[in-house]
């Protein structure tokens, strides 16, 4: 993973910001940025796994359909 960082602006509900600030105040995180980085990282890890599982299921489904069509061609068209 790259250590290069870039700044971008994001709008959050005030309640989220209060909760983030609380985590920083109680020293659970050193900064707002670290809270957001951690949240985004965790979301991406979970989401990428979920999306990859969906893609794998689609690929398997396409293979099964192809197998079914081949069997259909072989046995039902005679």
Image (cartoon, rainbow, N blue to C red):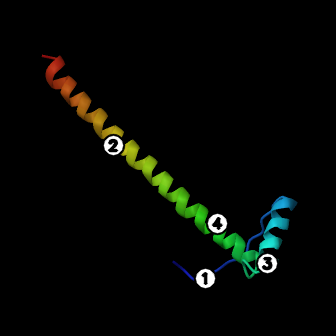
Tell me: 61 left or right of 28.
left
Q: Name the residue under label 2.
A: 60
Query: Distance between the Cα atoms at labels 2 and 4?
Result: 30 Å
Question: Label 1's element?
Answer: loop
Mark 1 or 2, nearer chain start: 1
For marks 1 and 2, give the one nearer the viewer: 2
Mark 2 or 4, nearer chain start: 4
Q: Mark 4 points at which residue?
A: 40
Q: Mark 1 points at which residue?
A: 4
Question: Label 2's element?
Answer: helix
- Is residue 43 depicted above or below 23 in this figure? above
Q: Which of the pair 52/27 is nearer the observer? A: 27
Q: Badge 4, how many Cα within 10 Å: few under 14, some, many 20+?
A: few
Q: Which residue lies furthest to the left in this view?
A: 78
Q: Mark 3 points at which residue?
A: 26
Tally of numbered tags? 4
**Residue visible at 53% across and 63% down in the picture:** 45
* Discs 3, 4 touching: Cβ within 8 Å: no
- Is residue 23 depicted above or below 67 in this figure? below
Query: Distance between the Cα atoms at labels 3 and 1?
Result: 28 Å
Query: Distance between the Cα atoms at labels 2 and 3?
Result: 48 Å
Q: Which of the pair 78/1 is nearer the observer? A: 1
Mark 2 or 3, nearer chain start: 3
């Amino acid at each position: 993973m790259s250590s290069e960082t870039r700044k971008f602006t994001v709008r959050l509900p005030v309640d989220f910001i209060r909760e983030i600030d609380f985590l920083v105040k109680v020293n659970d995180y050193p900064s707002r940025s670290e809270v957001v980085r951690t949240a985004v990282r965790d979301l991406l890890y979970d989401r990428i796994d979920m999306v990859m599982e969906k893609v794998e299921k689609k690929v398997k489904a396409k293979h099964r359909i192809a197998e079914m069509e081949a069997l259909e061609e072989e046995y039902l068209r005679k």
